Each structure stands twice: as structure tokens, then as C-alpha cells.
Image: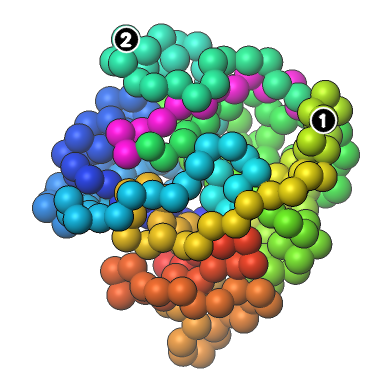
Amino acid sequence: MPITTIVLNVTDVERSVAFYTDHLQAKLLGAVTEAGATLDVLTATLELVAVGPQAPASTWVPDDLQRGFRHVGFKVDRVDPYVERLKDAGVQFHLEPIEAEGGVRITFFRDPDGTLLELVERDLQYTRVLDEAGVAAERAQGVPERPRFDHVALTVHDLHATEASYAPLGFTPIGAIAQPHDARGFDIHYLKSGDTVLEVFTYGVDKTGRAPQLDAPGYVAAVLATGTQGQAGPGAVAAPGLRPVGAVGGRTVHADGDGFTTVLGG
């Protein structure tokens, strides 16, 4: 039951389509309309949904200590050529390229509506491997010819509660990476389903909360392939700790205890 789609609210559909196709080599699926567009990023799609000028300002803040959604991550063959082209286009960077824990090279930047995006080069070398087969399957995906959707990251209060919420949806722990140089007690755990991952941040310090926003620019929800739409109908999957908080495109959006939002089925 992997992540099939990331839903993003955008204030200018054509501008966002140009950004993702030009800079991340996403492929347009179908037509661009006033209502939005859909883009292929190999292991998933990006669903761009138009929001009008009256859309509220986003309450998301980029400090990682706000619980819920943090960023969308893509695997690439090499980080630096993308960074060079993004900088030439005047894209705002959140973190310059660095060699990070886990043996990867990463960078962070924002799309035109402020959604935080990550590029990752090389396979992760986990501090702790929790599922050898899952790690082997991840590495078997190989180096992508163009940016491939890899994960969506979230900050949580209780790792075990998060694992319990997403286990019925097919997400199993495959590894963890300690961050020994971070005084906040930062660790990352990876919950994998199919070819996609929930990258779960935990911290040993106080965190802030955020109510889900389904009408503001930026991240709206990750669509999980449970085989059903919402929780209705035969074969629906129940996940503890997820509650309905609204709808997008006629689909029910659920939030977990940290305010991270998903659509069950798609």
C-alpha cells in the first residue's frame, strides 16, 4: 500500500507545472486546466490543485520541530547539477548541499508556493537495519535517470504510535539513522511500503503542533494505495489514530495524532 500521489495546493498551476517539469523532470499527464494538473515522478504522481487568491496563508514553519508534514524527498543520480540549475533559475534554498548522516548527499529548496523539497544522492547506509529484505528492495531500485519520488517526511511525538497507525496500511520499519551531532536528540526512522517511504523524525525536545490546512498553499495529503476510497466500502482499511478532517477532490482526508494528513485509497 505505497504512496501513490502527493497532493499540493498551488496558487498558479502553469507556474508550478513549469517548475516541476523544468527542474525535476516531472512528466505531465493529461492537460493543464484551471483546476490543476497531474505530474509523473516515477514511483508516484504529484497532483497540483489550484487555490484562489482568497486562500489562507499557510501555518507551516520550516523548523522540523513542528509536528506533521516536513518535506517531499526525491532520489537523484547527482545532487549538484540540479542545484546549479535551480540556483541559475533563482530558486530559494533552505539547505545547501551537504554530506549527511547515512552516507548521502542532500539539499533542500522550496517550490513556488513554499513546499519544502529534498534531493538525495546515493543509497542510505542505516545506523540500524531493521528489515534486510526491505533495505535490499530499496537498493534494487537503482539510480534514477530523472528525479524519482522517494519519501515524505514528518515529525512525530511518539514513534511507536506512528508505527501503529501506519502498519495496517502496509508501512513497515526498515531502518533508522542516528544523528549523534544534533543536541535535540534527533533520530530518523524509515517506514517503507512498496517503493515509497515515510521518513519519520523524532526529537527529544518539545515540539509544536499544527492543525491540518486543506485550503492553504503547499502540502495537502499523501494518497495511500489501500485499494479503497476513504474508509467506505468493502475492503476498507482501518488505521488506529487516523481521523477524518475534511475532503479534497471528493476524497476524505485523514490526520494522525501529529496532524500529518493522508487519503486512504487511490
Q: Residue at 16% across / 39% down in the picture?
A: 14
The residue type indicated by label 2 comes to Asp
Whether residue 229 appears in magenta in the rendering, the answer is no
Confirm whether residue 134 shows in the render.
Answer: no
Does 139 appear above or below 266? above
Instruction: Check residue 88 in the rendering and tell me which mark sits there, or answer none.
Output: 2
Q: Which residues are magenta?
A: 102-113
Q: Residue at 41% across / 31% down in the picture?
A: 110
Is 155 displayed left or right of 45 in the figure?
right
Q: Residue at 62% across / 40% down in the picture?
A: 64
Q: Secondary structure at mark 2?
A: helix
Q: Quadrant of residue 41?
A: top left
Confirm whether residue 217 shows in the render.
Answer: yes
- First-in-chain label (2 vs 1): 2
Q: Position of residue 236 (x, y in %)?
A: 54, 83
Does 242 appear above or below 207? below
The residue type indicated by label 1 comes to Ala
* Near-viewer residue (261 or 176): 261
Q: Residue at 30% across / 75% down in the picture?
A: 250
Q: Which residue is mark 1?
A: 183
Choose mark 2 or mark 1, whichever is in front.
Answer: 1
* Near-viewer residue (139 or 22): 22
Is 147 displayed left or right of 18 in the figure?
right
Quadrant showing the C terminus:
bottom left
Q: Quadrant of residue 81?
A: top left
Q: Quadrant of residue 97?
A: top right
Q: Position of residue 2 (x, y in %)?
A: 56, 58
Residue projecting furthest to the bottom = 234
Q: Secondary structure at mark 1?
A: loop
